Amino acid sequence: MIGEKPNSFQEAREMRLPNSHLRVRYSTQYYHFVVRGPNAIRPDHELVPTWADYRVGRDPVLAWILHHASTSHARSVGQRR
């Protein structure tokens, strides 16, 4: 996201899961660059997709955006009259 504070998780490591043999990457260090820095742009609405969403091909983030974009457009068109 653009506008967020520069703190982040870094120093990635990789491992192979024993049963599935999938390779995964994970962060080992959190860098706290700014303790009290400038204000960040925060999302108005946080959406966290679940594994169940991903598994069935559902994208709740895109669905939310499309729904609110269409209702915002309808409201702005109605206000111009």
Image: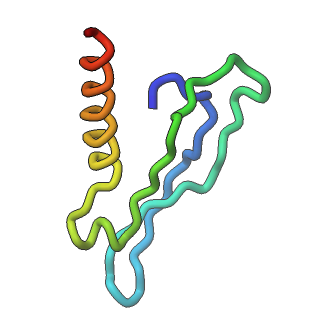
Residue 6: horizontal and vertical position, in percent?
Answer: 60, 28
Decide if residue 9 is on the left or right side of residue 38.
Answer: left
Residue 31 rendering spot, x and y as whole percentages: 66, 39
To which quarter of the image does residue 66 belong? top left
Q: Is residue 53 left or right of residue 37?
A: left
Q: What residue do we see at 24% from left, 18% from top? A: 77
Residue at (44% x, 70% y) in the render: 15
| Colour pattern | rainbow
Return the x and y of residue 17 as percentages of the image width and height.
41, 80
Q: Nearer the viewer, residue 28 or 60?
A: 60
* Residue ID at (37%, 70%): 51
Against 63, is 80 above or below?
Answer: above
Picture quarter with the C terminus: top left
Looking at this view, name the residue that lies furthest to the left.
57
Question: Which residue in the rendered view is the most extreme toward the right?
Answer: 36
Dividing the picture into quadrants, the one containing residue 48 is bottom left
Left or right, 6 with respect to 62, comes to right
**Which quadrant: the N terminus?**
top left
How many numbered circles are shown? Answer: 0
The image shows residue 79 at horizontal and vertical percentages of: 32, 15
Vertical position of residue 13 compared to residue 18: above or below? above
Q: What residue sits 33% from the left and 37% below the top?
A: 68
Residue closest to the far front: 81
The correct choice, above or below, for 18 with respect to 37 in the image is: below
- Kindly give the residue lying farthest to the top in the view shown: 80
- Quarter where residue 74 is shown: top left
Closer-to-camera residue (58/10): 58
Is residue 38 or residue 13 the one in the foreground? 38
